[in-house]
């Protein structure tokens, strides 16, 4: 779907609010399956690690989190699978509401153990780059949204799905939340945006040109 202001003064833009959760991850899984269909079938039968399976699991996680975000209700806006830049990066979910603006990075480790400390997120004891990546994602979103609609503070959130999930100590600048708690966690945070400001930010966040400035050049 494309949109443009009457008179043609504004470049056309795609409405990202129509995106399905897990869109990018699911698309990548399908691409990998089509590139090597026989290997993909064997990998699924044998249970061996496959890039295709990882992408599909990621998409499953994003879809579940999207389902849980439906509980946010009036006053909240959610955009899924937000493409950023020209290198194939995307943000799983951008959430805008009374409590502010959040970038949500879903991590589906439903069969594994996830432990969080102030310095890192560990999967089965192995340290990940999740904190660093989430900080970068929020910082990038902050820059692009601020350019589009004035000063915006974006908060990074990692949403975890795990067989065993423990937070031993909270990271300083990244929120880590279990998938079952995400809607409640968001709605119980202090209000910082008026309803009017929520709509102003959403109006820009839903445009693909906001996330890919070169499209509006």
Image (cartoon, rainbow, N blue to C red):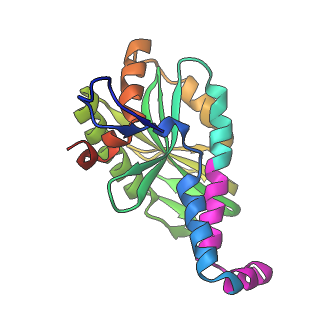
Task: Count how many numbered circles sit on residues in the image.
Answer: 0
Instruction: From this view, report whether residue 87 is shown above or below residue 82.
Output: below
Side of 3 relative to 150 (left or right): right
Q: Residue at x 66, y 62 (%)?
A: 57
Farthest residue to the right: give it: 45
Task: Locate the C terminus by quadrant.
Answer: top left
Instruction: From this view, report whether residue 177 is shown above or below residue 146.
Output: below
Side of 181 relative to 121 (left or right): right
Asked if residue 182 is among those painted magenta in the image, a careful observer would answer no
Asked if residue 55 is among those painted magenta in the image, a careful observer would answer yes
Residue 135, percent from left and from top: 36, 50
Q: Is residue 84 visible?
A: yes
**Which residue is more in the foreground, 10 or 19?**
10
Residue 4, percent from left and from top: 35, 31
**Which residue is more in the foreground, 191 or 40?**
40
Q: Which residues are magenta?
A: 39-62
Q: Residue at x 65, y 79 (%)?
A: 49
């Amino acid at each position: 779907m494309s949109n443009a202001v009457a008179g043609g003064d504004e470049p056309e833009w795609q409405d990202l609010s129509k995106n399905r959760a897990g869109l990018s991850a699911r698309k990548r899984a399908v691409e990998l399956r089509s590139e090597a269909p026989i290997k993909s079938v064997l990998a699924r039968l044998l249970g061996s690690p496959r890039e295709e399976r990882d992408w599909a699991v990621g998409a499953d996680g994003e879809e579940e989190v999207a389902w849980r975000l439906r509980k946010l209700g009036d006053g909240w806006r959610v955009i899924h699978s937000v493409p950023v830049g020209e290198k194939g990066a995307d943000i799983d979910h951008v959430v805008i509401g009374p409590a502010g603006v959040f970038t949500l990075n879903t991590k589906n480790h439903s069969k594994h153990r996830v432990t969080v400390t102030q310095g890192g997120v560990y999967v089965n004891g192995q340290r990940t780059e999740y904190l660093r990546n989430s900080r970068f994602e929020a910082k990038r979103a902050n820059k692009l949204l601020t350019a589009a609609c004035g000063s915006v503070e974006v908060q990074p959130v990692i949403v975890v799905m795990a067989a065993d999930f423990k937070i031993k100590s909270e990271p300083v600048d990244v929120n880590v939340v279990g998938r079952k708690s995400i809607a409640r966690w968001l709605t119980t945070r202090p209000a910082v945006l008026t309803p009017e400001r929520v709509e102003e930010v959403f109006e820009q966040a839903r445009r693909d040109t906001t996330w890919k400035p070169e499209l509006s050049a």
